[in-house]
Amino acid sequence: MRLNEQSILEVNILKANLKNNIMAKTAMKSYSLAEMKDKYIGKKGTKDRDQYEYELRMDLLGQMIKAARQQRKLTQEQLGELVGVQKAQISKLESSANSATIDTVLKVFKALKADIHFNVKIEKQYLQLV
């Protein structure tokens, strides 16, 4: 009986080793974020990818405005009064700056006493004004 139990144990160990070897050989391929964007959103320069990149930048801009407002301990209503717009427009701007004009964005940052800097890059070189 002990021999039979030992044989069963050995068979189970062999099965486990075989399973581990098979799993090791079929490792899952990993993808970079850039590869995933290319595959599911579109390659750089395509309409869908450009729209995605634009919306992402506008969302980040909205988040920056919200963070700066909170750091200044202002409510949306107070910031709206400083800028000359309604609270609803500040709320919309913070959730996504898609519909904001550059003039409004500049007024908001000025009201927040925040410096903003723009970089223009042409063919891997930053454009500088002297």
Image (cartoon, rainbow, N blue to C red):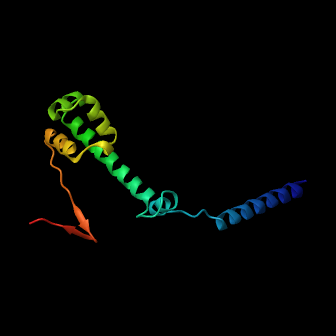
Residue 53 image position (x, y, % from top left): 38, 55
Identify whether 44 is placed above or below 74. Answer: below
Label tally: 0
Asked if residue 65 lies left or right of residue 47, the reply is left
- Residue at 32% x, 48% y: name it: 58
Q: Quadrant of residue 122?
A: bottom left
**Quarter placement of the C terminus:** bottom left
Identify whether 65 is placed above or below 121. Answer: above
Residue 38 image position (x, y, % from top left): 48, 62
Asked if residue 21 lies left or right of residue 54, the reply is right
Residue nearer the viewer, 105 or 21: 105
Residue 18 image position (x, y, % from top left): 74, 64
Residue nearer the viewer, 78 or 20: 78
- Residue at 16% x, 39% y: name it: 112
Residue nearer the viewer, 55 or 13: 55
- Residue at 27% x, 44% y: name it: 64
Residue nearer the viewer, 21 or 102: 102
